[in-house]
Amino acid sequence: MADLAPQQGTKDAQTITTREALDQVNPVLRSARASRWRWQIFAITWVAYAGFYFVRQAFSVAKLGILDDPAVNTVLTKGVLGVIDSIYLAAYAAGQFLWGMWADRFGPRVVVVGGMIGAIVASCLMGLSSAVLVFGGAMVIQGLSQSAGWAPLCKNMGNFFTVKERGRILGLWSTNYAFGGLAAPPFLGWMAYSVFDGWQAAFFAGAATLAVVLGLFLVFQRNTPRDVGLEDPDHDPNAAPSADGEEEERLTGLALYKETLRDRMVLTLGLCYFLLKPARYAILLWGPVIVAERIPEIDKAGATLIPVAFGVAGVVAPIIIGWVSDNVFSSRRAPACVLALGILTAALALFMPLTATGSVGIMIAVLAVIGISVYAADAMISCVAAVDFGSAKGAGTAAGLVNGCGSVGAILGGLLPGFLSGGVLFTIFAVAALLAGALMIPHWNRVPRAA
């Protein structure tokens, strides 16, 4: 594309492209380009995070085959699998605290691409070897790689969408991980137990899927509107530069992290997410096993498919909760969270009594209610509220901090099902959800700083 030379005598004039020149004189064209890029970023980041789940869920699907495989189940016992899950989640938590800050400093693209590559490699390693040390080491790599997705991609979305629309837009966008959790297990289970008849195939199928997503991400993603010649969505051309903005520009690394830690709302979100995450991850990582234990007569394919109800409800939940927070509660995030956490508390407390009948229909219904409430609260806390209450330059750091706290709690979700009975497990989860709701009540009327 041809360049247009700057006018002679114009101080500090910069060479611009023909398209940029047309944008400056044609607001309609500029608006159309901005809209196209916003929805392109929405689409590619949505696909990117959903893609991560096709390697993340491979271990959950493979557990059924591992526990039924006499060649490995004497070593890879249920308890050992729980420990391996906790190793993965510990690495995932550590990465969350790190990668959000890196995304603020270096941009989301480099962090997300590195995470995808690491996740693909780790998944292939687990498909090639069943040795405990290989599994453990690969899960460390997988955890660090998976954690490179959420906070950087949340920041990427926050760069292209304004505060006033984030409840609806990020609520819709947050369906990515519910969709990933919904679509990945049946696909991986079909590949592992119907097409290839071997649990190892789950890891290879997941790696191949994410490799395709990686190629799309490299082609279509950009970090900020400025990278494509557009203004930031919250930019006010008539506003004078603020001292706070200048100070924020200077904050990097640990200084930015310390600044984020001073925000009481961010810390509250982190604690609430710590309490919420174990229930979601227990069902995400152990769903087929939990179903098989409550309905012993069901086969492996059925045990893999029934938890799909949890994922289906999770796809709808972020859309509903985002709309409610923006339109019913005027961009206040706490009331929507408290509502979702109240429903979740009741569903978790009633899980064991309701599923004692062994009814497939009741199991599906209970998992659906848990799914819609846990994913609603999860999306609001981990994405919308974390980005809203983090500073403009520290959105990735805030999202990483909140999600890091949640990931510490998720370790329990991966570990406890391997050692506790269902009654004790779901009672603990219900109490944790109730406490998380109570912590959010004092922030009922709080709104984002930029609202």
Image (cartoon, rainbow, N blue to C red):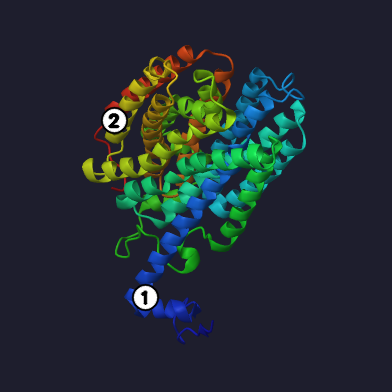
The answer to the question of whether label 1 and label 2 lie on touching residues, with beta carbons closer than 8 A, is no
Residue 429 position by quadrant: top left
- The circle on residue 29 is 1
Mark 1 neighbour class, 10 Å CA radius: few under 14, some 14 to 19, many 20 or more: some
Label at residue 281: none
**Placement of 170 over or under 15, stated as above or below:** above
Q: Which residue lies furthest to the bottom in this view?
A: 8
Hey, what amino acid is under mark 1? Leu
Q: Which residue is drawn at 63% across and 28% down?
A: 63
Q: Which of marks 1 and 2 is nearer the N terminus?
A: 1
- Can residue 148 be seen here? no
Which residue is at 42% across, 25% downward?
Answer: 363
Q: What crowding class fits label 2: few (fewer than 14 Cα within 10 Å), some (14-19), or many (20 or more)?
A: some
Instruction: Describe residue 98's horizontal placement relative to residue 320 as left or right.
Output: right
Q: Is residue 240 above or below residue 91?
A: below
Which of the image's four quarters has the N terminus?
A: bottom right
Relative image position of residue 112 (x, y in whole percent): 58, 49
Quarter assignment of residue 192: top right
Q: Name the residue under label 2.
A: 339
Q: In this view, does 339 lie above or below 17?
A: above
